[in-house]
Image (cartoon, rainbow, N blue to C red):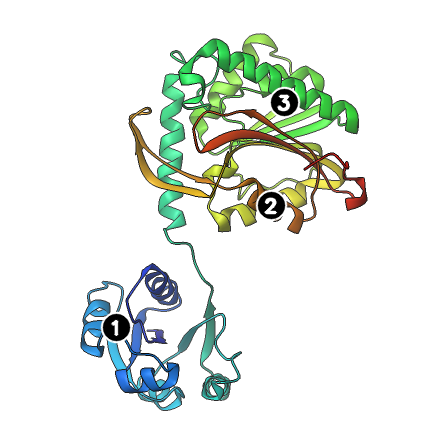
Amino acid sequence: MTRVLAPGVFDVFHIGHLNYLMAAGQHGDELVVAVQEDRAAERQKNIQLATPLAERIALIEQLRFVTEVVSYSDVFQGPLLRALNIDVFACGDEYGFDPRYTDQLKTLQFCEENDIKVVRIPRTNHVSSTRVRAHLKQFWSARAAKATELPSGVTTLGSFNGNQNQVLEQTMRECSLIRGAAERHGARSMIDLGCGDGRHLVKLVGHFDQITGVDFAPELVALARKKIDAINPDARLELSASDILQYKTCSQFDLILLSGITPCLDDHQLEQLLDTIIQLAHSNTCLLIRTSVAINKRIDLINFFSKELGTTYTAYYRTQGEILENLNRTGWTLLEACQLYQHRTDTAVWWFELVRTSKNMLRPDVP
């Protein structure tokens, strides 16, 4: 049995503590949690603890994945690691880097000398990404059943109060933006990540030499195939029922489209997606993003019940600044940005056009 030790103070137990312990427990068979006692913690941190040791231990003992809870005093963990026969020492990203806590360095050295594996637990998201992704897949799979009711597309959710003529009009506008970008950049190949029921693809298959659509809801991919076969059965098109975060191909594309997919991803998953699209892009690839944007401040809705949709859904509405910061950090330069429409008092749908070129290409009139 592999035994993991996760030390900490755990005062005012919160979701960050829970995620830290859950992640630590994944590195072994038994998780031992070490809780620093009151006097030592207060002396070390120069604070007054809000929760006494007995209560902190009692809270952690109720976690079903915790094998044992002990308390300790000294920051140096060597004797505790030896006495408890620990195989893996779990700590945070910052452990050992603060010069005030030299005993943390001694603990890391002890682990190295005694063949104890050290795992660093990064700050994790406040909800289980795996669980949210499972709910998300169920949500979008269920949307496919509304294809007859929503012929212009099942992925626009509550936009235009479901008015199908307005949805179709907006789709035509967005496809015009895509074709215009393709002409400006000489794009002959395109990939639509999160293609849904093919709302865009069905109107674009004749415009590109190579076109690929990817979506993790097989029911939506089947709808896209049915729509496209009905108008162009000989279209050069590849459709894949795959999670875009795990999608692999040797191809690189002139144009990458992300339509409505980024709000479905938490911050860690968004980082994964941006890493993925780098692999799909060459030096002159154009990236097009259609996404809902929070107008004033970020809005996170997790398993949120929508009266309008009659079901729960999860969405992360980022501000325009946050979106562009993530893209700039991964090497994308903004060329165009415009608001398509505003469908809520605190969110609006925006369109971004970006390229992988130097920043001196940025148009002076782009905000």
How far apart in space, not on screen, are marks 3 and 2 (Cα)?
24 Å
Q: Secondary structure at mark 1?
A: loop
Q: Amino acid at mark 3?
A: Leu
How far apart in space, not on screen, are marks 1 and 2 (Cα)?
41 Å
N-terminal label among 3 and 2: 3
Residue 50, disc: 1
Q: Secondary structure at mark 3?
A: strand
Mark 1 and mark 3 in contact? Answer it, CB < 8 Å.
no
Q: Residues within 10 Å of mark 2 (few under 14, many from 20)?
A: some
Q: Quadrant of the C terminus?
A: top right
Viewer can see residue 240: no
Give coordinates of residue 11: x percent, y percent: 29, 71
N-terminal label among 1 and 2: 1
Residue nearer the viewer, 214 or 38: 38
Residue at (77, 45) in percent of width and height: 359
Q: Where is 277 relative to 38, above or below?
A: above
Viewer can see residue 28: yes
Residue 237, disc: 3
Please name the residue that numbered disc 2 is placed on: 274
Give coordinates of residue 45: x percent, y percent: 38, 81
Q: Amino acid at mark 2?
A: Leu
Callout in the foreground (3, 2)? 2
State the image quarter where residue 282 is shown. Answer: top right
Q: Where is 137 relative to 79, above or below?
A: above
Q: Residues within 10 Å of mark 3 (few under 14, many from 20)?
A: some
Residue at (38, 54) in percent of width and height: 126
